[in-house]
Image: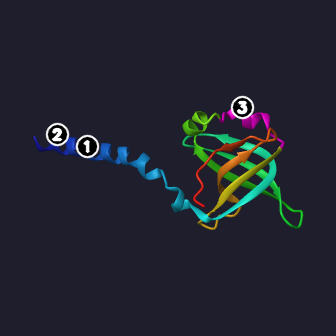
């Protein structure tokens, strides 16, 4: 009689751990990015990772010495991008073209990584693609 009770308790505990895992994976803006260290970037759009929960896009940006650095930018969740009218196709149509973005640098010292806030493709329309804290 005690063995089924133990298995039942173990199943409940395992279920609770499985439910808790997705919630612990999400993070707040201030935990990962420095809202007081934001800047503007201009570069060539080279790649897009349209994945849940956040999309990431990549720019080749020339530094002051002319060396090209590849930067990655995190956006809002996909559902929020879509609600704001920013679809995957828009990034695809602008692949290889110049893009302007305002973003905040990562807190963890990770080089060439930032949270995107506003984004402008060649059409000149300013799009809100992420959260800025400045």
Occupied quadrant, residue 85:
top right
Q: Secondary structure at mark 3?
A: helix
Q: Write down the quadrant of residue 2 in the picture.
A: top left
Give the magenta range. Answer: 86-97
Callout 3 environment at 10 Å: few (<14), some (14 to 19), or many (20+)?
A: few
Q: Quadrant of the N terminus?
A: top left
Relative side of 3 to 72, left or right: left
Q: Nearer the viewer, residue 85 or 48?
A: 85
- Residue at horizontal 21%, vertical 45%? 9
Q: Are marks 2 and 1 in contact (CB under 8 Å)?
A: no
Instruction: Of the two numbered discs 1 and 3 on the same chain, state the one appearing first in sequence.
Output: 1
Disc 2 element: helix
Q: Which residue is mark 1?
A: 12
x, y percent for residue 88: 68, 34
Q: Position of residue 59 (x, y in %)?
A: 77, 50
Measured as percent of width and height from the top left, residue 87 is found at 66, 33
Reading the image, the residue beneath label 3 is 89
Which residue is drawn at the image coordinates 78% and 33% (left, top)?
Answer: 93
Q: Residue at x 25, y 46 (%)?
A: 10
Which residue corresponds to the image point at 59% horizontal and 66% vertical from the top-left? 108
Residue that carries the numbered disc 2 in the rendered image: 4
Measured in 3D between alpha carbons, the distance from the residue under mark 2 to the one under mark 3, in whole angstroms, is: 53 Å
**Residue 73 placed where, x, y %?**
67, 52
Look at discs 2 and 1 and give the one toward the viewer. Answer: 1
For the residue pair 71 and 122, the one nearer the viewer reads as 122
- Report the Cα–Cα distance between label 1 and label 3: 43 Å
């Amino acid at each position: 009689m005690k063995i089924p009770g133990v298995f039942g308790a173990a199943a409940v505990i395992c279920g609770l751990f499985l439910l808790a895992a997705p919630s612990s994976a999400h993070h707040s803006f201030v935990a990962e990015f420095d809202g007081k260290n934001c800047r503007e970037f201009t570069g060539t759009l080279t790649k897009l990772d349209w994945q849940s929960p956040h999309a990431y896009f990549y720019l080749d940006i020339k530094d002051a010495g002319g060396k090209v650095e590849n930067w990655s930018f995190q956006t809002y969740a996909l559902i929020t991008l879509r609600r704001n009218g920013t679809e995957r196709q828009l990034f695809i149509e602008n692949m290889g073209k110049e893009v302007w973005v305002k973003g905040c640098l990562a807190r963890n010292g990770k080089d060439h990584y930032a949270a995107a806030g506003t984004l402008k493709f060649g059409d000149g329309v300013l799009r809100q693609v992420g959260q800025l804290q400045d």
